[in-house]
Image (tube, helix red, strand yellow):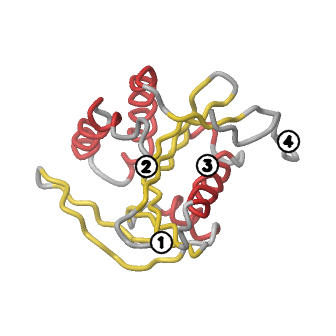
Amino acid sequence: MVHIAAGPITMPGREHFNARLAPITEADFETLARLGEAIWRLHYSKIISMEQIDYMLSGRYTAEKLRAYLNADDRWLELLWLDRRAVGYCSHAISSAPGEMKLEQLYLLEECRGKGLGGLMLRHVETRARARACRVLMLTVNKHNADSIAVYRKSGFAVREEAVFDIGNGYVMDDYVMEKVL
């Protein structure tokens, strides 16, 4: 298990909590799928249609897709545990561009936002990228996802380009590609 904090995290004006990241196991697949569904339905319903959310969720959390992260040396998917409760997750992978890692996913339950947990996950991914000699951390984010874009900008990311990705079934992802030089 990869711990992202040694003991309780204390932040002025906020409660104490124990947070840790742990690589997923097959036993976590259902937990991850439920967590992803809860986060996506609440967050993305303001940005894309419920039909598109259903379509994206149906293909994202299959056992086949999640198994690709088990014991891999080029991609990682970790659950964020707050005490004994899964509250978020992040995934990242070595990209096809030399010296670059992609932050694929960074999701957190709404009730857990604003407590520094997203920043803990992001710093964890940055540390992993540096350890793999990656000089750039990149991500894609929906152009209308203003809250996430603001967080990424505050964390040192800048827009590299705009891109539209056809994801099938008549749906596209209209994104910014953002990057941070490490």
Q: Nearer the viewer, mark 3 or mark 4?
A: 3
Which of the image's four quarters has the C terminus? bottom right
Instruction: Quote the CA–CA distance across marks 2 and 1.
Output: 14 Å
Tell me if label 2 and label 3 are in contact, CB under 8 Å: no
Check disc 3 and report its element: helix, strand or loop: helix
Q: Three-letter amino acid code at disc 3? A: Met
The answer to which image quadrant residue 151 occupies is bottom right
Residue 16's label in the rendered image is none
Q: Residues within 10 Å of mark 3 (few under 14, many from 20)?
A: many
Check disc 2 and report its element: helix, strand or loop: strand
The answer to which image quadrant residue 66 occupies is top left
Check disc 4 and report its element: helix, strand or loop: loop
Q: Residue at x 84, y 46 (%)?
A: 11
Quickly name the residue at label 2: 75
Residue 99's label in the rendered image is 1
Label whose residue precedes the other's in the sequence (2 or 1):
2
Residue with the most extreme bottom position: 160
Residue 10's label in the rendered image is 4
Label whose residue precedes the other's in the sequence (3 or 1):
1
Q: Three-letter amino acid code at disc 1? A: Gly
